[in-house]
Image (cartoon, rainbow, N blue to C red):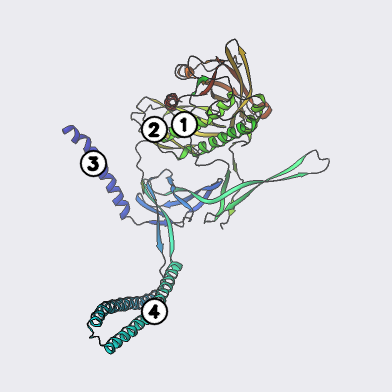
Amino acid sequence: MRRNEMLVSPLAGLVAVQVFLLAAVASAAPVETKGKIESVTLYRGEALVTRIVALDAAPGQVELVVTDLPERMEPESLYASAEKGAQVRAVRYRSRNIGVAPRAEVMKLDEQIETVTKAVRENELNVRRLKEQRDYLTKLQNFVAPTAQVELTRGVLDSDKLKALTLFMFDQMKSFAGEELAQSAKRDELSKQQRQLESQRATLTTSYAKLAREAVVFLEKTEPGAAQVRLSYVVSGSSWSPAYNLRASGEMKEIKAEYNSIIQQMSGEDWDAVALTLSTASPNIGAEPPVLAPFLVQLSPGEGGVALGWGSESGTSGATGYASSHRRMRELDQSRSAQTTRSALAASNWGINVESQKKQGAELYASEQVARALREAGAEEGSALSVNYKLTGPVSLASRADQQIVRIADLTLAAQFCNIAIPLLTERVYRQAEITNNSNIALLEGICSCYLNSEFVGKGMLPVVATGQHFKAGFGSDPQLRAWREFVSRQEATQGGNKEVTLQYRLVLDNYKDTPVTVRAFDRLPHGGNELRVTLSETKDKLSTDAEYLRAFRPSGILRWDVEVPAKSAATTARIVDYGYKLEFDKNMNVEPASEDDMQKGKAMMEMQMESQ
């Protein structure tokens, strides 16, 4: 019991400190400012805007309100940081209505609406009265008719009285019908007046309503003098696309090219003299690379032909399915950053691997003609090269949610960077850091935002890391590196009672840097039971000798090369890794997708690799 008290006591103290700090901030007079937009990174469909706010306040708690945020700002993207001398405690987004409609005009409309409302209630009472009178007349009619029939039978019927009573009821029924019609018309007219008046009032109040969008930043000023606060947020309604002018002249030995950008700027705020960067990247792309799962297959009786579940071998349908999987992989790759849990990220990675297995399965049964169609289908999407253009000089372009942040510790952790290329899954080459937690505290699982050279490169997931434990973190794709995989050929032969299928592939690595880089390139072999023999052919580039890779992943068919890519190597000078493999199996069998149970084993292997790669 006393141990629990000891554990709770520091936590209660921490909560008390937070409450005190927030109360102190709330009591301070807010500092309002618009700040100045310093820089904008414009993506395809959105932009990252950064404002600079000069804060000259005495040391202590400060509530800074940054006003005039644009309508198309994404509140969840709001982020604030401060330079030395100030520390951001929390930042939140708020919106509030400002501006009031003229009171006299609103009161006049309210009086008219009340008058019409009273008339509507009176109309409802009249309609109810008429219904009651009609019901009474109906009861009287139901009484008179049977009574007249009895009197007629007995021979005592007074025909004059019956006639008078009948005419009276007919007159009353006619009168009721006329009055009901009048009340119905009056009700429709009153409803129309009521709608018109309420619409006028809504239009009047809306025309004067103005929504103020603001960022509220809670800071602790630790030093006197001016401090600089940066506020960043993402806005939609902005995009750019390239446009070129190509000019030939003279002896037509050269072409003058004008590379322009067509910019759409509809963010809701003007960008006046800002440092503008045009980017083909996306802030929504995950920072971590995908993980390559084993390619599991099994044998089935048959004499070759179509691989069940992998589509037709015909050039048209096979290539169409191949291209469809290729496009689906790109979509899944783009959406991986939306995952916020390890299980969701694993599911997303598995989706990419499933589509890639469809592609590889089609390759197993591709004739030379089909192989050519598959190569064309895989290349139709074009390059996934990611670049940033920082425009020189200031550029002016006119336009046509609470989170607490408490610093736990500032850590300096040892790290080594490497480049990860998995051309089978993505053309991007990812930067990955191998980090050692050499601090004295454990790190808990959570979302991490990754920055490289002060630039945001994406989000990732940090696992639980104990003191002294190693972990890996992605730092986004390198825009100057690119990798892709080419299906070269397939040959099939029969040796005795076995069928032999030989496939050749090529990994292409581009390096646009001025210095050579080392890249870890991954691919995989089919991985099946004892009835399927898979032999990797001799290659110029030897597989990695990393002990962890050889122990954990090579036995499941994962291939890894650690290759150096020379500087300025691309296109015809790109770094090539050629490899191939041979499948041997009973000629009466086919290679087909693995069973559902085996596929789940492959998924488990991938999840294990996610913790290691």
Q: Residue at x 42, y 36 (%)?
A: 344
Q: Earlier in the sequence, mark 4 or mark 2?
A: 4
- Three-letter residue code for mark 4: Leu
| 3D distance between C-alphas at marks 1 and 4 | 69 Å
Q: Nearer the viewer, mark 2 or mark 1?
A: 1
Q: How far separated are the C-alphas under marks 2 and 3?
A: 25 Å
Residue 148 marker: none
Circle 4 Cα neighbour tier, 10 Å, few/some/many (<14 / 14–19 / ≥20): few
| Residue 581 place in picture, x, y as percent | 58, 17
Name which of mark 2 and mark 1 comes first in the sequence.
Answer: 1
Q: Which residue is mark 4?
A: 181
Q: Which residue is mark 3?
A: 12
Q: Spot the residue most to the right.
A: 251
Determine the residue located farthest toward the top in the rendered image.
Answer: 496
Type of amino acid at the residue the image marks with label 2? Leu
Left or right, 230 with respect to 254, comes to left
Residue identifier under label 1: 350
